[in-house]
Image (tube, rainbow, N blue to C red):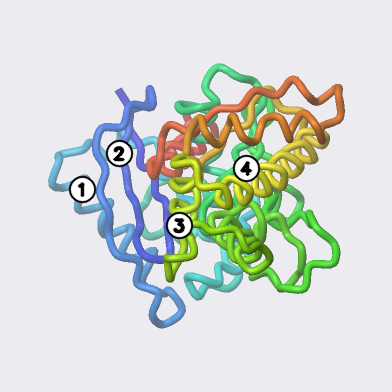
Amino acid sequence: MRYGFGVDIGGTTVKLAFFDETGMLLDKWEIPTVTADGGRQILPDVAASVASYIKDHGVDKNGVIGIGVGVPGPVNDAGVVNRCINLGWGVFNIAQELSQLTGFAVKAGNDANVAALGEYWKGGGAGYTSMVMVTLGTGVGGGIVLDGKVLHGAHGSGGEIGHMVLRRGETEACGCGKRGCVEQYCSATGVVRLARRHLEAAQMDSCLRHRQNITAKDVFDAGKAGDGLALEILEDYYDHLGEFLADLCCVVDPEVVVLGGGVCKAGQMLLDGMTPYFHRHVFHAASGAKFAIARLGNDAGTYGTFKLVLDAFG
C-alpha cells in the first residue's frame, strides 16, 4: 500500500491529511498559517509538519506518492502561484519549493478547484462525469471538473465564477473592485445585503427588524418560521441564485452542480427554493443538470489535493 498527503492552505489555518492510495482518509490535523513577513514561514511549517508526522507514525518514505497542496489564489498547471493576497505571496513555483523542502513530488492547485475535485472524487459529485462545484460562503467560489480533470484555465483563474457579472447598474462595489458580481447576491453576505435592502424598502413587520447584526442563517431561520418579509428576501435570493446557476449551466452543461459553503446548511430548503428559478432562466438544452449538496465539508480540499497527486504521480 502506498500513501500521500493532502494540504489545504487557508488564511488562518493549514489543513493537512494523510491518505492511502485508495483515497481513504487515515488522519488529519491543522497548523496555524503564519502570514507574517510575506508568508515566508508557511511552506517550511508545512514541510516540518509532514516530516514530524512521518517520524512519529513510522511512515515509510519510499511508500509516499507525493504531496498535494491547495492555495487561495491562481496557480497554473506547472505549480506557479500568481499572487495569494491573503498569504502575502507574490509569484513563485510552490510545487518546486515545497518539493525541495520535503523531498517528495508535489502537485499544486487553486483551493476552490481542488475542493471541487475532492467532491467530484469522493463527495456529492461521485459517479458523475462532469460537475460544477459552487461554494456559497462569505464569497462565491467554485471549480469545474470535466471528464475527471479540473479546468484550471490558461492563467490559473478557471472557475472564478463568483465574479461573473449578474446585475448591471449595481452601485455598491464587490471586493474584487467590480460592481454587480454574483458574489454580491448569492453569497452569505449577499443574503444579508438583500435583507438590508428589503428592510429599508418595505414597511412590513418582521422579526429581522429586531436583530442588530443579521446573518444569512437568521434570514433562513425566519423564513422557516413563516416570517413574511424573510420569505420575500429568500425569494429574491433564490431568483438571483437560479439565474446565476442557469447561466453557468449554459456554458458548462454539467451532469451535476454540487453546492457547498455555509449557505448550503439550509439543505433541501435551498434546493427547493432555487430550482424553479433555475428552470425559469436556463436554456432548455442545459436544463437537465442535477443538484446536490456537498458532502465532504472542510475536508474537500485535502481530498482534492491528494487526488491531484494520484493523477500526476500515482
Q: Amino acid at mark 1?
A: Tyr
Q: Amino acid at mark 3?
A: Cys
Question: Answer yes or no: do the residues labelled 2 and 3 have beta carbons within 8 Å?
Answer: no
Q: Secondary structure at mark 2?
A: strand
Specify few, some or many for label 3: CA neighbours under 10 Å numbering under 14, 14-19, or 20 or more.
Answer: some
Which x, y percent locates residue 157? 69, 54
Specify few, some or many for label 4: CA neighbours under 10 Å numbering under 14, 14-19, or 20 or more.
Answer: many
Q: Which mark is residue 207?
A: 3
Q: Is residue 314 above or below residue 77?
A: above
Label whose residue precedes the other's in the sequence (2 or 4): 2
Q: How far separated are the C-alphas under marks 1 and 4?
A: 30 Å
Q: Amino acid at mark 2?
A: Phe
Tell me the mark number nearer the camera, choosing from 1 and 4: 4
Label whose residue precedes the other's in the sequence (4 or 3): 4
Q: Amino acid at mark 4?
A: Gly
Question: Answer yes or no: do the residues labelled 4 and 3 have beta carbons within 8 Å?
Answer: no
Q: What residue is disc 4 on?
A: 143
Quarter of the image holding residue 177? bottom right
Q: Is residue 253 above or below residue 58?
A: above
Residue at x 58%, y 52% (from the top left corner)? 229
Label whose residue precedes the other's in the sequence (3 or 1): 1
Q: What residue is disc 1 on?
A: 53
Question: Answer yes or no: do the residues labelled 1 and 2 have beta carbons within 8 Å?
Answer: yes
Q: How far separated are the C-alphas under marks 2 and 3?
A: 46 Å
Q: Which mark is residue 18?
A: 2
Q: Is residue 131 above or below residue 68?
A: above
Tell me the mark number nearer the camera, choosing from 4 and 3: 3
Tell me the mark number nearer the camera, choosing from 2 and 3: 3
Which x, y percent locates residue 72? 53, 59
Label whose residue precedes the other's in the sequence (2 or 3): 2
Q: Which mark is residue 194?
A: none
